[in-house]
Amino acid sequence: MAKKLFLKTLGCAMNVRDSEHMIAELNRIERYDLTQDESEADLIIINTCSVREKPVNKLFSEIGQFVKHKKKSAKIGVCGCTASHLGEEILKRAPEVSFVLGARNISKITQAVNSEKFLGINIDHDESEYAFGEFRQNLYKAYINISIGCDKKCAFCIVPHTRGDEISIPHDIILNEAMKATKNGAKEIFLLGQNVNNYGKRLSGGRKGELNFSQLLSQISKIDEVERIRFTSPHPLHMDDEFLEVFASNPKICKSMHMPLQSGSTNILKAMKRGYTKEWFLKRAEKLRQMSPNVAISTDIIVGFPGESEKDFEDTMSVMEEVRFEQIFSFKYSARPLTAAAQMTNVVDDETASLRLQRLQNRHMSMLDEMSSKYLDKTFEVYFEELRDNGMAAGRTSQNFTVCVAGSEELLGKMKNVKITRPQRLVLYGQIV
Ligand code: SAH
Ligand code: F3S
């Protein structure tokens, strides 16, 4: 009989893909069916994120809840970035946890599950050419890893310490994955990495890749069945002209660009070790809008980084005014262990950081109102991916705007033209035309 697996995934798209890989690996040996009910599971896995402090703090209370509700024989495992950096501490503080598997050690999942106790947190472990089993939760949109780890070491970021050095995956593996996914019905390929546009600089064993990121995008677009290509996250520093040119001119590449700003102040960017200035970022964004007039730009912003003055924050606000980002993911700075910024003493007090975050978010909301009202009566091509409550189906435009229409399963995996009848800040409602 099949076993039951309860798998909770936190964090980014890379974690979503890691979870799919774990499910595929487990199913190679024996069948595991997914369940939403932890009390009937034979195996409970939490795939954790450690980018900010909050979810890490919640981990142990969450494990406590699972221990309370689980079947007596069920095993609990903690995987992902928090597993990488807390490692043995998890096994000590929560003796009910039987394995801890870091983000770069996913291929060891079967071994971990079949051990009494298992700790696999080696961040030098190289899975860049490992042939993971097949499993996708979403058949319409296929996540494909193109690199693991990150070399950038931004001062605030724990990721290089949990996912290790950056290694690109050979392009033939990526192209093969894309072909397999399209055979199974995916029209959209979503490339994943911490720093995607640095692709190809180093493969396993230090070899240089044969293709750079722009060339990889072109190759993927040559697969007939691929209709849309997305990627995350690119780094603003590597947005050279060749990349912007390929992005603008290739009709299969979705016109949605993530440009993680982090801060609009050149001083703070320097302290963050981001490698670009305010002016440089603004010029790249301007060039991008010039070359791709219908692009939507999204960004990540951190407020309250150590040393951020009122003037620095105003710089961030002014970049937001100038670029008019269509989407912003904004965060209060959270000091993370192992990072350079955690040693900085010029901290911004929590109240100031909260007020700045609120100001930024309020202003962006009003910008969104102005922007979204312009989409009334416009028609977009929408790729439908999921069902929502109350008889709605949701999909995305090339610019990554969410569009909802009345509809059901028959729309999933289809591309339709939709005229917007009720634009809201985060969702555009419309009708198929
Ligand atoms: N490689 C990705 C970043 C992954 S982390 C990139 O370059 O975009 C995702 C986002 O979380 C970051 O862009 C940053 O805005 C935010 N973040 C990372 N560390 C943080 C911290 N210590 N405090 C607050 N936000 C943080
Ligand atoms: Fe983190 Fe900077 Fe890499 S944000 S993931 S160190 S590009």
Image: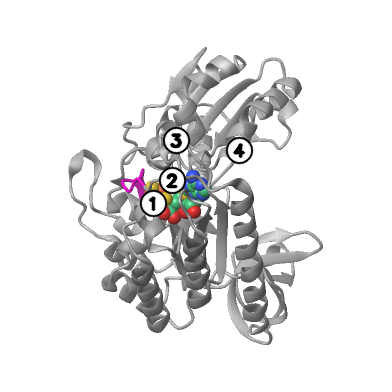
Query: Which element type, helix, strand or loop, lies under badge 3?
Result: helix
Neighbor class of circle 3 (other Cα within 10 Å; few <14, some 14-19, many 20+) is many
Quick one: label 3 or label 1, which is nearer the N terminus?
Answer: 3
| Residue underneath mark 2 | 156
Foreground: disc 3 or disc 2: 2
Quick one: label 4 or label 1, which is nearer the N terminus?
Answer: 4
Query: Quick check: can you spot residue 103?
Result: yes
Query: Label 4, label 2: how many angstroms apart (C-alpha)?
Result: 17 Å
Quick one: label 3 or label 2, which is nearer the N terminus?
Answer: 3
Quick one: label 2 or label 1, which is nearer the N terminus?
Answer: 2
| Residue underneath mark 4 | 55
Highlighted magenta segment, given as a residue range: 146-153
Residue at point 50% right, 45% down?
A: 347
* The disc label shown at residue 103, or none: 3
Looking at the rendered structure, the number of numbered marks drawn on it comes to: 4
Query: Which element type, helix, strand or loop, lies under badge 4?
Result: helix
* The disc label shown at residue 272, or none: 1
Query: Label 4, label 1: how many angstroms apart (C-alpha)?
Result: 23 Å
Give amino acid for label 2: Phe
Query: Label 3, label 2: how many angstroms apart (C-alpha)?
Result: 19 Å
Give amino acid for label 1: Met
